[in-house]
Image (cartoon, grey):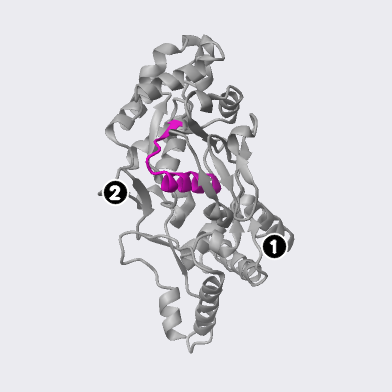
């Protein structure tokens, strides 16, 4: 048992990078059991005390960008700075208790060999302990606390991703033993990406595409699929309808691994949020805690970019909001951006304006496809 305690609850404070493992249910249950045993052992000591929970800080100030030596792939990791959840501090006591409550539910889920979404878990906690979990954000933060404590992924805890993602175009999918799905025949709605990460890991993928195009917005995705753009430029279209969920990122990552020669291009609004969405696909997300680095892909920025602005009518520009400026500052200080990306952000801030992809419709609804095709043919992406 002593060896198990040392191995399963080892913290990575002495290492440069911290991360969450994907581990089997039996090992997760063992980590939970060791946590409980350690807690009880301290309570039963001659000088009983309730120890703090040491958790890796999920802040930009504690992040590091790990640049690949042999590839262009870079990933964002969390470093070793630790914060605590303490029962003795009034502002942290509820957070301390929440960790143990969610740990209990996850243990039951794993015993039953089931999976739940974060939304389902919230309603369970709302019914059982509404004073501790009055909103979804309390459940989401506590899950990340538990990931940081046990050093295992959310999926390993029995928590399934709720996917918003869609895929269309020159991609054929097949679950083992199931029928083939041709994503070029799924209409303008595309094919819904499953939130089951195990299923996504086991998909058989085939394509004759030459590009993968990430589309920030659902409406733009629908326009491109309706126009059958993926036949004009042989491509796979994928959208998460904004900031990407982990299931959409996993499918993109799998495509990038199975077809490593396919360029991955991103079409986003010309504003700080659009670039932040691109960076989430490219580097990972600090908001995902110790899973931040997982499923990073080598994404190139197709558009909109600064030199595209003369294509847009003046009346289509809108002023940057305070939130835009906050995101811009966060991006610049993150250490993730290369110089040409920083120049784009600086131009956004300097101009005080933002532009949306839809502004290209000024030239007609068919212009969007022409715009993308021209940029791809000219290799106009960074």
Q: Residue at x 59, y 31 (%)?
A: 218
* Viewer-side residue, 97 vs 228: 228
Lateral position of residue 143 relative to residue 254, left or right: right
**Percent position of residue 232, x then y:** 50, 23
Q: CA distance from mark 2 to mark 1?
A: 45 Å
Circle 2 SS class:
loop
* Span of residues in magenta: 246-266
Nearest to the eye among marks 2 and 1: give it: 2
Q: Residue at x 43, y 85 (%)?
A: 2
**Percent position of residue 226, x then y:** 61, 24
Tag 1 residue? 129
Whether residue 188 is visible here, answered yes or no, is yes
Furthest-right residue in this view = 127
Tag 2 residue? 68
**Percent position of residue 301, x then y:** 39, 31
* Viewer-side residue, 186 vs 180: 180
Circle 1 SS class:
loop
Magenta span dominant secondary structure = helix
Compared to residue 164, the image places residue 318 above or below, namely above
Q: Residue at x 52, y 39 (%)?
A: 243
Q: Quadrant of residue 365?
A: top right
* Viewer-side residue, 295 vs 343: 295
Q: Are marks 2 and 1 in contact (CB under 8 Å)?
A: no
Furthest-bottom residue in this view = 46
| Magenta region includes residue 254 | yes
Q: Residues within 10 Å of mark 2 (few under 14, many from 20)?
A: few
Picture quarter with the C terminus = top left
Compared to residue 357, the image places residue 52 above or below, namely below
Q: Earlier in the sequence, mark 2 or mark 1?
A: 2
**Percent position of residue 86, x then y:** 50, 67
Q: Residues within 10 Å of mark 1 (few under 14, many from 20)?
A: some
């Amino acid at each position: 048992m002593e060896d198990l305690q040392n191995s399963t609850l080892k913290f990575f404070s002495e290492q440069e990078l911290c991360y969450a493992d994907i581990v089997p249910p039996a090992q997760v249950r063992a980590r939970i059991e060791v946590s409980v045993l350690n807690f009880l052992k301290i309570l039963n000591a001659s000088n009983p005390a309730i120890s703090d929970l040491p958790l890796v800080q999920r802040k930009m100030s504690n992040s590091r960008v790990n640049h690949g030596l042999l590839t262009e792939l870079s990933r964002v990791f969390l470093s070793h700075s630790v914060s605590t959840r303490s029962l003795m501090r009034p502002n942290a006591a509820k957070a301390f208790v929440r960790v143990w409550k969610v740990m209990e539910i996850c243990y039951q889920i794993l015993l039953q060999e089931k999976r739940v979404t974060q939304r389902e878990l919230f309603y369970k906690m709302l019914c059982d302990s509404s004073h501790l979990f009055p909103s979804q954000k309390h459940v989401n933060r506590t899950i990340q606390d538990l990931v940081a404590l046990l050093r295992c992924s959310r999926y390993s805890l029995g928590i399934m991703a709720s996917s918003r993602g869609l895929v269309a175009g020159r991609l054929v999918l097949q679950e083992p033993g199931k029928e083939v799905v041709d994503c070029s025949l799924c209409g303008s709605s595309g094919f819904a990406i499953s939130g089951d990460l195990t299923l996504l890991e086991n998909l058989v993928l085939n394509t004759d595409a030459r590009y993968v195009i990430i589309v920030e917005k659902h409406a733009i995705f629908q326009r491109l699929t309706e126009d059958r753009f993926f036949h004009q430029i042989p491509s796979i279209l994928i959208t998460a309808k904004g900031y990407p969920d982990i299931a959409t990122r996993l499918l993109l990552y799998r495509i990038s691994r199975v077809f490593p020669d396919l360029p991955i291009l991103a079409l986003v609004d010309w504003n700080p949020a659009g670039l932040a969405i691109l960076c989430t696909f490219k580097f990972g997300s600090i908001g995902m805690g110790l899973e931040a680095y997982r499923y990073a892909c080598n994404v190139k920025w197709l558009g909109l970019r600064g030199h595209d602005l003369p294509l847009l009518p003046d009346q289509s520009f809108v002023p940057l909001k305070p939130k835009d400026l906050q995101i811009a500052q966060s991006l610049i200080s993150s250490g993730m951006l290369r110089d040409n990306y920083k120049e784009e952000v600086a131009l956004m801030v300097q101009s005080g304006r933002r532009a949306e992809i839809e502004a290209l419709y000024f030239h007609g609804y068919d212009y969007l496809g022409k715009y993308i095709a021209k940029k791809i043919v000219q290799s106009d992406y960074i």
